[in-house]
Amino acid sequence: MPGLIIWKNQEINKLRRDMDRLFTRLRDDFGMPHFKRPPRDIPFIDLSETEEDLILKAEIPGLKPEDLDISITDDILTIKGEMKQELVKESEDYHRMERRYESFSRSIQLPCRVIIEDVEATFRDGTVTIIMPKCKPEISQKVRIKIK
């Protein structure tokens, strides 16, 4: 019986992939606006940690630094931006001109608090790198209370 269940799951997954391909072709080849592209997390990020810093790298191709808004509130980092693209083909008669404006916002919960005043960001080759110094952990104190 387990062999039948595995075969059934494989067939269902194959059908799902075929349907996804069909809808993608309808949307891309025939310009059907009813089949929107599924949302994705933009920008793609890598968050790493050293002893002293959190380092976030976000891939944002096609953007300029002035199109980005990066902010930190408590332990939440937010990256916002707006992508603008124009596709114009030079010819005597225009049959098609396309423009795309897409905005995004992504918030990431940081694993610890950071020193907001010392955060630095650099932008190079479509990748923004944010270095965030971590706050020193507060040392808890133990106080012995006298009983009267």
Image (cartoon, helix red, strand yellow):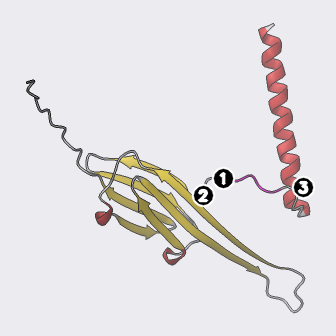
Residue 42, label in figure: 2
What residue is rendered at 56% in x and 72% in y?
63
Marks 2 and 3, the one that precedes in the sequence = 3
- SS assignment at label 3: helix
Q: Residue at 39% across / 66% down in the picture? A: 121
Q: Are marks 1 and 2 in contact (CB under 8 Å)?
A: yes
Q: Who's the residue at 84% across and 89% down the image?
A: 91
The three-letter code of the residue at mark 2 reads Ile
* Region in magenta: 36-40
> Distance from label 2 to label 3 (Cα)?
24 Å
Q: Is residue 144 magenta?
A: no
Q: From the viewer's perspective, is 22 left or right of 87?
A: right
Left or right: where 7 falls relative to 136: right
Q: Which mark is residue 23?
A: none
User: Mark 3 and mark 2 in contact (Cβ < 8 Å)?
Assistant: no
Quadrant location of residue 104?
bottom right
Instruction: Using the rendered view, name the quadrant where residue 132 is placed.
Output: bottom left
- Which amino acid type is marked by label 1? Arg
Residue 48 horizontal side relative to residue 88, left or right? left
| Residue matched to label 3 | 26
Whole-percent x and y of residue 17? Answer: 81, 39
Quarter holding the N terminus is: top right
